[in-house]
């Protein structure tokens, strides 16, 4: 087993909370173990251009300057798929760049796309350990960024409730997450959302409308100031009635993924269509004294995209902790000759890992969890399914996060 003397750290894909914690965790562990470590700038673009780049050495002084609790990455990112680079000598170019800087292995933080490149690089004989990172939470493991994003979705949604209530508006709040609904699901629950629409559940918009109508009207009737709102959190990856995703037509990233956009507007238009053909609104609003002919005949529905706000700003303490564990554990794995794998977690003195090709397989929201929250009155755009609990006594230590 060849001795590891120097490691490179790469962060790749979308930015999110916890990445700087991965860097500081890896740096502190490497420095403790007497291994030199450096940041390779701007993800796989930097890796490809090591012949002209000078990686940044992360000694303890440099590591101390990185704030683990701030989202984003000190090392920078790029969306580059190595196999798609139009250069037949690309892998030799990368190996030559690594050799030039005496880098023996790579610690790479990223999601499924990043992980697919880890698999590719490992097949080319480049030693890599993958630290799972994606705010989408759709890997088989927990991934850095998920908790921070969920907290920010909940935070902004709770704050938006005040403007919804002030103006008697229904709000459709669209959030990132691509083809899995984890962030909308848990962020919406944390914000006491009335409805949560996710890719895992085909949406019956008539059912969503009936839920909106019942809850909004009840709140208006029972309010002494005649105020009401309705909050619907939706994932960007929901589909239209024909089963198609909402996309910027023709716009794809370097990994070939279509850019998702427009789900919020579609949901709003569906609810407005049902509402404006329902005479019950005029009857109720007149009775409650909030109707104005030609001006205020229906509640206003607004869609809001939280966009990059949910991946920016502060990092949650959980993600700082997991990020540091992931980065440091990757160093320990590499030092002990284990590469081509994904860090799963660190519990007590156990560092667990799995094959990266398995770790990056997409994971969706569990249908049984959906029925549990339907039993609590949250609308998921379908007729609620009965929750059927199974009771099991546990003994000893249990750790589970999402």
Image: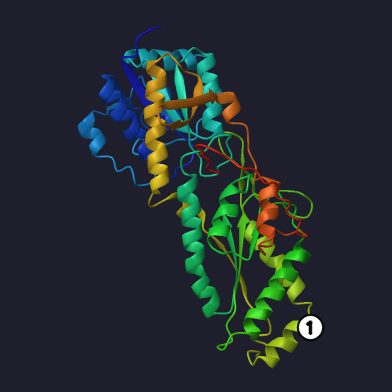
What colour scheme was applied to this rendering of the protein?
rainbow
Q: Place residue 86 in its image quadrant.
A: top right
Figure quadrant of the C terminus: top right
Locate residue 70 relative to residue 258 in the image: left or right. Answer: left
Q: Residue at x 40, y 18 (%)?
A: 334
Locate residue 243 relative to residue 329 in the image: left or right. Answer: right
Q: Residue at x 54, y 24 (%)?
A: 354
Figure quadrant of the N terminus: top left
Q: Place residue 128 in its image quadrant.
A: top left
Residue 50: give x, y in percent of width and height.
37, 22
Q: Nearer the viewer, residue 161 or 100?
A: 161
Q: Name the secondary structure under disc 1.
A: loop
Q: Nearer the viewer, residue 228 or 313?
A: 228
Residue lying at the far left in this picture: please name it. Answer: 61
Using the rendered image of the protein, determine whether residue 199 is visible from the camera's viewpoint.
no
Q: Nearer the viewer, residue 12 or 139?
A: 139
Q: Residue at x 54, y 21 (%)?
A: 119
Residue 194: give x, y in percent of width and height.
63, 66
Locate residue 98 relative to residue 256 in the image: left or right. Answer: left
Q: Nearer the viewer, residue 275 or 259?
A: 275
Give neighbour class at mark 1: few <14, some 14-19, many 20+ (Cα, 10 Å): few
Number of callouts: 1
Locate residue 70 relative to residue 182 in the image: left or right. Answer: left
From this view, report whether residue 311 is shown above or below residue 305: above
Using the rendered image of the protein, determine whether residue 285 is visible from the camera's viewpoint.
yes
> Which residue is label 1 attached to?
279
Residue lying at the far top in this picture: please name it. Answer: 1
Residue 296: give x, y in percent of width and height.
64, 85
Residue 227: give x, y in percent of width and height.
57, 83
Q: Place residue 29 in its image quadrant.
A: top left
């Amino acid at each position: 087993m060849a001795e590891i003397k120097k490691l490179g750290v790469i962060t790749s894909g979308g930015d999110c909370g916890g990445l700087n914690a991965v860097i500081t965790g890896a740096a502190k562990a490497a420095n403790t173990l007497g291994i030199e470590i450096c940041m390779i700038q701007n993800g796989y673009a930097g890796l490809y251009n090591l012949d002209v780049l000078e990686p940044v050495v992360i000694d303890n002084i440099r590591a101390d300057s990185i704030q683990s609790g701030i989202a984003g990455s000190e090392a920078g990112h790029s969306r580059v798929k190595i196999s798609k680079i139009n250069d037949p000598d690309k892998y030799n170019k990368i190996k030559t760049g690594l050799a030039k800087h005496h880098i023996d292995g790579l610690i790479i933080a990223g999601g499924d796309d990043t992980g697919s490149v880890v698999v590719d690089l490992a097949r080319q004989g480049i030693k890599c350990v993958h630290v799972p990172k994606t705010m989408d939470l759709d890997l088989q493991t927990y991934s850095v960024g998920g908790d921070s994003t969920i907290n920010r979705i909940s935070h902004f949604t709770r704050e938006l409730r005040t403007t919804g209530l002030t103006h008697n508006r229904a709000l459709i709040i669209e959030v990132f997450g691509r083809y899995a609904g984890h962030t909308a699901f848990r962020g919406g629950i944390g914000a006491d959302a009335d409805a949560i629409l996710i890719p895992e559940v085909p949406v019956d918009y008539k059912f969503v409308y009936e839920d909106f109508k019942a809850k909004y009207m009840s709140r208006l009737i029972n309010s002494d100031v005649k105020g009401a709102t309705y909050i619907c959190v939706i994932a960007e990856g929901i589909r239209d009635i024909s089963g198609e995703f909402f996309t910027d037509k023709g716009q794809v990233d370097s990994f070939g993924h279509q850019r998702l956009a427009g789900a919020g507007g579609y949901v709003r238009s569906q609810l407005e269509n049902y509402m404006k053909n329902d005479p019950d609104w005029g009857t109720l609003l007149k009775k409650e004294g909030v109707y104005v002919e030609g001006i205020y005949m229906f509640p206003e529905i607004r869609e809001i995209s939280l966009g990059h706000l949910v991946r920016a700003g502060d990092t949650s303490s959980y993600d700082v902790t997991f990020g540091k564990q992931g980065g440091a554990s990757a160093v320990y794995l590499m030092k002990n000759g284990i590469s081509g794998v994904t860090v799963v977690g660190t519990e007590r003195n156990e560092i667990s890992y799995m094959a990266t090709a398995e770790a990056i397989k997409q994971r969706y929201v569990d249908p049984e969890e959906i029925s549990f929250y339907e039993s609590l009155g949250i609308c998921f755009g379908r007729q609620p399914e009965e929750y059927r609990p199974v009771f099991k006594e546990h003994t000893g230590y249990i750790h589970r996060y999402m």
